[in-house]
Amino acid sequence: MLIDDAYAELGLAPGALEAEVKAAWRRLVSQWHPDRNKTATALRRMQRINTAYEQIRLTGFEPGAPAANDSAASAAAPQPAPRGRAPQRRVRLTLEEAALGCVKVLRSKETKPCARCDGRGYRVLADACASCDGHGVVRNQAWYGWVSTMETCSACHGERRARQVCEGCDGAGRLTRSDRHTVRIPAGVRHGEVLGAAETEGPFELHVELSPHRFFVLGEDGILRCEMPVDGFAWMANQWVDVPTLSGLQHMRLKRGHHVYRLRGQGFPSGRLGARADYMVTVVPAFAESLSAEQEALLERLSALSTGPVRRWQRTLQVWDRGRRKASSAS
């Protein structure tokens, strides 16, 4: 902030006395301190008042600490962020990206106050406002000149100094910058984990969030679980089916009578860059509620060809029934 702008910010002419500067500063602090002024612009205005006062004090006064009455204003000024720490960002990953590692492109937009005008959108000049002759108010004629009212000057907004639109931000008071950064995510990261900038080879400290998966459930031990329906007849016939894995679809042969299958080394890494755990697939055989005529005929043929305990039971039952009927007819 230029020294003339600093005096204008406090509503003073350049070269004002120390007592006048402190009096103006205390008056503005009393008016704009966020503890007393709840408007949205109070904090930004308080920052500009503090900046102006410090600029004048360091330039025109004896070096030294502010007086005791300066404590309220200095408390309102934001404290600088710790240096040397990378900015923090959040990154959302799929389970596949977290397990296998990936490269992510992070895009962001950052809006900051314009440094050339301290976020005001204009520069305060040393000259008095030409619209109000430096009074901060203008007379508004009404009722054919019989009655007049005083209104805040729209050119200087009551600050009495001439304004010039900031060329750096075209009067917006803020500048927006778009960033694009490529970061590398190592394999095996978990939900809630924080990656340092050195690990990601990027400028950010990343907080990892894992999105819920429609198929997989991840355990703390890295074991991945999936429950999937399979055709009941395919299960009975020991056929091959496609199962989802972190790397894509994989063939798996069903075994009649088995419901849980273990795919070794197809789960999530047990630790950062560690070996992958196992993948447990639970199959649920499903049968259609209604069958076609062809399916009914095939089932009848299959039933007729059945062997084993059921067939032996049927033969024993037939022998018993014949003996019962023979005994009944003899009596």
Image (tube, rainbow, N blue to C red):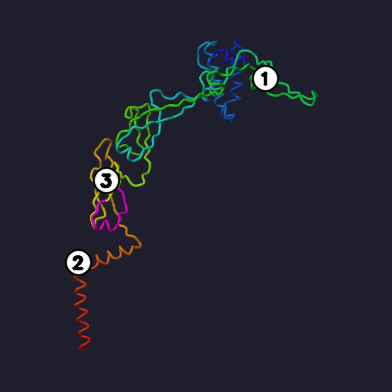
> Is 33 situated left or right of 317 in this image?
right
Mark 3 and mark 2 residues within 8 Å of each other at the beta carbon: no
Mark 1 and mark 3 residues within 8 Å of each other at the beta carbon: no
Q: Which residue lies under the disc numbered 1? A: 136
Task: Pinpoint residue 55: horizontal percent, then vertical percent.
Answer: 53, 15
Question: Residue 137 lies in what quarter of the image?
Answer: top right
Neighbours of disc 2 within 10 Å: few (<14), some (14-19), many (20+): few
Query: Magenta span covers which residues?
Result: 221-240
Q: Which residue lies under the disc numbered 3? A: 250
> Is 33 situated left or right of 290 in this image?
right
Question: Which residue sits at x=35%, y=36%?
Answer: 193
Q: Which residue lies under the disc numbered 2? A: 307
Q: Is residue 231 above or below residue 274?
A: below
What secondary structure is marked by label 2? Answer: loop
Q: Which mark lies nearer to you, 1 or 3?
A: 3
If you read the primary sequence from the N terminus, does the residue marked by circle 1 or circle 3 appear first? 1
* Mark 1: amino acid: Gly
Asked if residue 55 lies in the magenta stretch, the reply is no
If you read the primary sequence from the N terminus, does the residue marked by circle 2 or circle 1 appear first? 1
Viewer-proximal residue among 279 and 46:
279
Spatial CA span between label 1 and label 3: 78 Å
What secondary structure is marked by label 3? Answer: strand
* Mark 2: amino acid: Thr
